[in-house]
Image: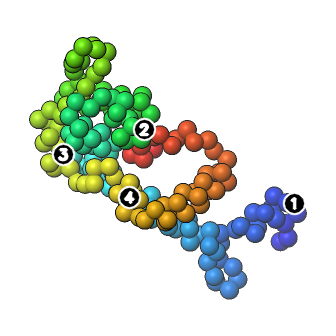
Amino acid sequence: MKPTSKTNAASASTDPTPNAAGDTAPALMVLRRFRIVFNAVKTHFRQIEKEAGIGGAQLWALSVVASQPDIRVNDLALAMDVHQSTASNLVKALTKLEMVAAARNGDDRRVVTLRVLPKGKKVLRIAPGPFAGVLPEALASLDARTLARLDKDLEKLVSALHVTDEAAKTPLAQL
């Protein structure tokens, strides 16, 4: 069947299904690689929840607080590259679970600093790593040239999806 409109023609040329010769289109191969990446991330977060009893983003926040005692919520947000409200929500959850203590110290009583409590330290001892997640660790292992190329190519993909970058500051564990 021949495409009858420009829209159909465009979609026919990018159809990720194998052609008559049995060759797999490049789009399908890339889709498969995305599935592998997403599955690795999802599997890691499931393992964290199973072994540590908390979510992946909570574990990452807990590990940052442990490595930087007296960190402020804004600095936690920067360290995790998340929105400040996301960091605040993670801290609230960890405080409620009695894994983190928030205290107002110093002259400026508005400043809240964070410390890991014994229960949080115990979770960090039993939780599977990497605490930030498998994808950030894998990305950190790539050279600068590869990262630049990947960033440029993913920018094109995001543009083709016609979406905003609102989700850019949401941890993968919360998607």
* Number of residues whose C-alpha sits closer than 10 Å to that of mark 4, classed few (under 14), some (14–19) or many (20 or more): few
Amino acid beneath label 4: Ala
Q: Identify the secondary structure beneath mark 4.
A: helix
Question: Which residue position holds label 1?
Answer: 5
Residue 124 marker: 3
Amino acid beneath label 3: Leu
The CA distance from mark 2 to mark 3 is 21 Å
The residue under the point 78% across, 63% down is 10
Question: Which residue position holds label 4?
Answer: 140
Instruction: Please indicate whether residue 93 sits to the left or right of residue 41 in the image.
Output: left
Amino acid beneath label 1: Ser
Q: Is residue 27 above or below residue 46?
A: below
Q: Nearer the viewer, residue 3 or 123?
A: 123
Question: Which tag, 1 or 4, sits closer to the chain's start?
Answer: 1
Q: Identify the secondary structure beneath mark 3.
A: helix
Question: Which tag, 2 or 1, sits closer to the chain's start?
Answer: 1
Q: Identify the secondary structure beneath mark 1.
A: loop
Question: Which tag, 2 or 3, sits closer to the chain's start?
Answer: 2
Mark closer to the observer (4, 2): 4
The residue under the point 52% across, 41% down is 167
Question: Which residue position holds label 2?
Answer: 82
